[in-house]
């Protein structure tokens, strides 16, 4: 049975495929970007939905549209759906009602169509979800894939899938402790794994922040330039149609800072009440770091409780595995180095696809076991003893327990 893995991200979606009998999955690559990422976007057109690359192209064409068309297109755009997914919500496009299940079905239909040539006869589907994701949202994604014809569906936590994906290409030594730090477009996930007795175990409860990602870094930059444009040109971009242009320019500027130069510039068209301003966003690295500092610290704080528990228990943190597009930000490395000074911080080249590779590889036999937080286990035993005397050792699940 062939397996398809899907990592539905706030910004991008990736797909991988494991052919029956093979030991490694492959990431599906698309000609549009010569890579594996499909933008997680939907745009309602008069003749139906456009999604992914097409929705992105239509959005870029907005720069050449008339003012009325821009307003119209903006109101038909679905971006970052994963972050505000809600089983109860309905949205209206062209006076038609759409539940979030409807939107997911439209988007996943596109993703599966675009990937079909690579992943034919995939009978099983594995998707991933972030730490703390509501059960109702996991069910919603599950239902969308069911409605698209899949009956054998499983799911897995994103940072755990990342370790599976990492392990496909890398060896984890006996005793080695790895902290997975997944900083994506909308969420931050942290998980600790250690190799013990040949098994990969997660002895500490993972931690996640569902409202902390690259989008929030973009928003901090937006706020900065909004004030600057207001001061210099007396134009409030939050009220006009330039909102989307500036958001996009802020994202591009942020991504430029992963290159070595110390000053970066991005042009941005600002339209307001008949005025058209060719504005240039410009920052030095120091100014950039000051603006995004709080947002990056918030992401790194997600790791603090996991790191503290590892230290309490004397578990080693030998390596920090960087996953997710936002972990490319230099300041993230710096803050993580500060938190865990002796760990090796690495991206290992699979930053963008480790999660989806792990999804597709979920059924490859591996020595893996889930352990609950060892401190919590001890507390449970104490509580148990208060009610009834028990001399049992804490139950430890160590052999091939599937963690979903
Ligand atoms: N070179 C870069 N420097 C800084 N940020 C980057 C870079 N490349 C991508 N990003 C940011 O990474 C984010 C997308 O990352 P990714 O594709 O891992 O997110 P996602 O999987 O869609 O989101 P999530 O897992 O949070 O749901 C975007 O905010 C993007 O701007
Ligand atoms: Mg992600």
Image (tube, rainbow, N blue to C red):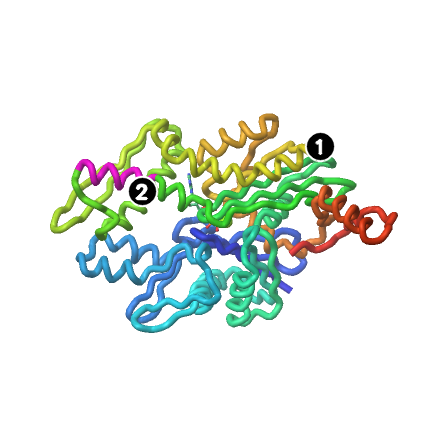
Q: Which residues are magenta?
A: 221-232
Residue in the foreground of this view, choosing between 273 and 13: 273
Q: Is residue 231 magenta?
A: yes
The label on residue 222 is 2
Q: Is residue 124 magenta?
A: no
Residue in the foreground of this view, choosing between 189 and 177: 189
Q: Locate ligand 1 by image quadrant.
A: top left
Q: Is residue 286 left or right of residue 67?
A: right
Residue in the foreground of this view, choosing between 192 and 365: 192
The residue at 61%/45% (across/down) is 206
- The quadrant of the picture occupied by the N terminus is bottom right
Outermost residue toward the front? 386
What is the x, y in percent for residue 161?
A: 60, 50
Q: In which image quadrant can residue 55 be found?
A: bottom left
The residue at 58%/62% (across/down) is 125
What is the x, y in percent for residue 154?
A: 62, 62
Q: Residues within 10 Å of mark 1 (few under 14, many from 20)?
A: few
| Label 1 sits on residue | 314
Q: Is residue 33 visible?
A: yes
Q: Residues within 10 Å of mark 2 (few under 14, many from 20)?
A: many
Q: CA distance from mark 1 to mark 2?
A: 42 Å
Q: Is residue 333 left or right of residue 218?
A: right
The residue at 62%/35% (across/down) is 307
């Amino acid at each position: 049975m062939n397996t398809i893995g899907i990592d539905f991200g706030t910004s991008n979606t990736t797909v991988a495929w494991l052919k029956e009998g093979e030991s490694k999955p492959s990431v599906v690559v698309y000609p549009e970007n010569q890579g594996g990422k499909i933008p997680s976007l939907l745009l309602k057109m008069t003749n139906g939905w456009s999604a992914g690359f097409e929705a992105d192209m239509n959005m870029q064409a907005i720069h050449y549209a008339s003012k009325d068309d821009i307003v119209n297109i903006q109101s038909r755009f679905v971006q970052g759906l994963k972050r505000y997914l809600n089983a109860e919500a309905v949205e209206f496009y062209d006076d038609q009602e759409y539940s979030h299940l409807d939107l997911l079905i439209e988007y996943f239909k596109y993703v599966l169509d675009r990937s079909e040539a690579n992943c034919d006869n995939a009978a099983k589907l594995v998707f991933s979800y972030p730490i703390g994701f509501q059960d109702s949202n996991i069910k919603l994604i599950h239902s969308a894939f069911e409605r698209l014809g899949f009956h054998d569906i499983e799911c897995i936590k994103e940072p755990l899938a990342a370790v599976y994906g990492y392990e496909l290409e890398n060896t984890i030594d006996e005793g080695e402790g790895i902290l997975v730090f997944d900083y994506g477009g909308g969420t931050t996930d942290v998980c600790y794994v250690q190799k013990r007795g040949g098994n990969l175990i997660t002895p500490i409860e993972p931690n996640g922040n569902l409202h902390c990602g690259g989008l929030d870094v973009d928003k901090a930059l937006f706020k900065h330039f909004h004030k600057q444009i207001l001061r210099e040109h007396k134009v409030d971009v939050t009220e006009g149609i330039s909102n989307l242009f500036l958001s996009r320019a802020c994202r591009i500027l942020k991504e430029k800072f992963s290159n070595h130069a110390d000053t970066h510039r991005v042009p941005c068209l600002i339209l307001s009440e008949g005025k058209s301003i060719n504005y240039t966003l410009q920052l030095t690295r120091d100014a950039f770091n000051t603006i995004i500092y709080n947002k990056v610290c918030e992401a790194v704080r997600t790791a603090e409780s996991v790191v503290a528990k590892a230290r309490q228990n004397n578990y080693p943190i030998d390596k920090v595995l960087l996953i997710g597009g936002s972990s490319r930000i230099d300041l993230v490395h710096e803050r993580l180095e500060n938190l865990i000074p002796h760990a090796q911080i690495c991206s290992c080249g699979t930053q963008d696809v480790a999660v989806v590779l792990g999804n597709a590889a979920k059924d490859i036999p591996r020595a893996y076991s889930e352990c609950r937080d060892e401190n919590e286990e001890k507390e449970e035993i104490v509580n148990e003893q208060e009610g009834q005397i028990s001399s049992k050792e804490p139950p430890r699940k160590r052999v091939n327990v599937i963690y979903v």
